[in-house]
Amino acid sequence: MKSKNIGYVPALDHVRALAALLVVFHHVHQRVGARLLSGSSSENYWTEVASPFDAFIVEGHTGVALFMVLSGFIFTHIAGDRHVRAAPFLVNRVLRIYPLMIFVFLLGTLARPDLASPLDLPRVLLIPFTLWHPVDLWFVPNIYPFTTLFWAIAVEFKFYLLFPLLIGLLQRDGIRALVVIIVAMVALRILLVYNGANPNDIAYWTIFGRMDQFLIGMICAAFYRSWDGRHALPMCIFALALMSLLLFGYNQATAQSWPDGWKILWTTAEGAGWGLFIASYLHVAPRLSKFLARFLAWVGEISFSIYLLHLVVIALLLQVGPFPLGFTPGVDAFLNGFFFVLPLTLLAATVTFHVVEQPFLRYRVRYLEVYSYRAITGSRGEAPIAMQAHADPERG
């Protein structure tokens, strides 16, 4: 995704593509697998996996975590040592998110007028400012499958509101300031669970659980800036192997019905694994073939549309299928996803990206300032005596 605040980095879109594909095939496994198993998609299909590799599909919800770590990484990488002006930064975020969110909501009201109408739009516009699951009926109409994934927008936007402050802390105090906040968030989750909150709900659906992942992304971006890429390939392989083992362990713990208290730390561990992957992959990406690199960049560019539309495509498939192919429900679901859901989702996402998203992206503004100091403390320890803010010179 090109930006007015930094030159284009294709590898970042590659990571977006991976995150989107993980979520797509996770939901294919859940919804299509349930229909193939029992003839009903009212229950989510879930399996105890036999290998760490299978966990990437069954526990593909980890793509949401990858998106969130990537958000922290990207904005920190863009900002560098420059000052982030909050108002223009939030203007860009609104231009990035609201047009497609509103379009999908209005599409849902046309498809399911029994559940909502365009008059509910004001409540949708407040989604980013809710603290809890935003698709509950008490707040935003739950128009399955159109608004089902809006909860992630609410969590993301809360980070956007805090980012100008967080990047200032990082620039002033270094990564230790962010580490302290991560520790504080873990302590807060412990306190909430101690007082009766569900640890899975707190960790998965809310900013109280997801903040760790944004902050880890910021820390990894700071690390990436000072890393020359030495041993990046084995580090990238290690990160993927680590994530497969973590997801395998998550799956097995769920299968064994362990108490959910351990999930207080899950988002932190999950974020650390993906942060290591992102920082190392950016050094590895130039080694990819041109065809694969371009394909991943294209998928990453339309990843937001993929994220919000793929459940709609899955719902359409369930109206006419899915198609049993003679394998296990999980394998059949994957093949239905690969041959039907993925191509149709890519087609629909390409259209909405160019028709709905891109026209608004042209109005994004620069939000960075470069501060030039004649003296930081002065040769005799006096306070700064001159500061000038310049418009960010980079155009993506």
Image (cartoon, rainbow, N blue to C red):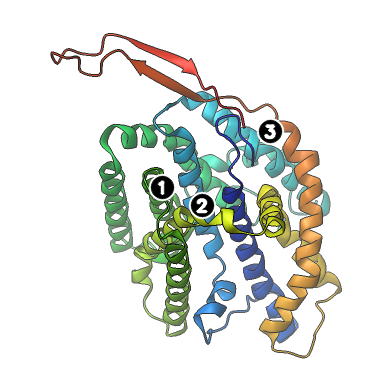
Quarter of the rendering occupied by the N terminus? top right
Q: For numbered disc 2, what is the local secondary structure?
A: helix
Q: Amino acid at mark 1?
A: Tyr
Labels 1 and 3 touching (C-beta < 8 A): no
Asked if residue 278 lies left or right of residue 298, the reply is: left
- Left or right: where 49 falls relative to 197: right
**Image: 151 above or below 62:** above
Q: Residue at x 46, y 21 (%)?
A: 369
Q: Secondary structure at mark 3?
A: helix
What label does residue 224 carry, if any?
1
Q: Residues within 10 Å of mark 3 (few under 14, many from 20)?
A: many
Q: Secondary structure at mark 1?
A: helix
Seen in the image, is 196 located left or right of residue 303? left
Q: Which residue is mark 3?
A: 361
Residue 117 visible in the shown view:
no
Residue type highlighted by circle 3: Leu
The mark nearer the N terminus, 2 or 3, is 2
Q: Identify the disc placed on residue 282.
A: 2
Disc 1 and disc 3: Cα gap in Å? 27 Å
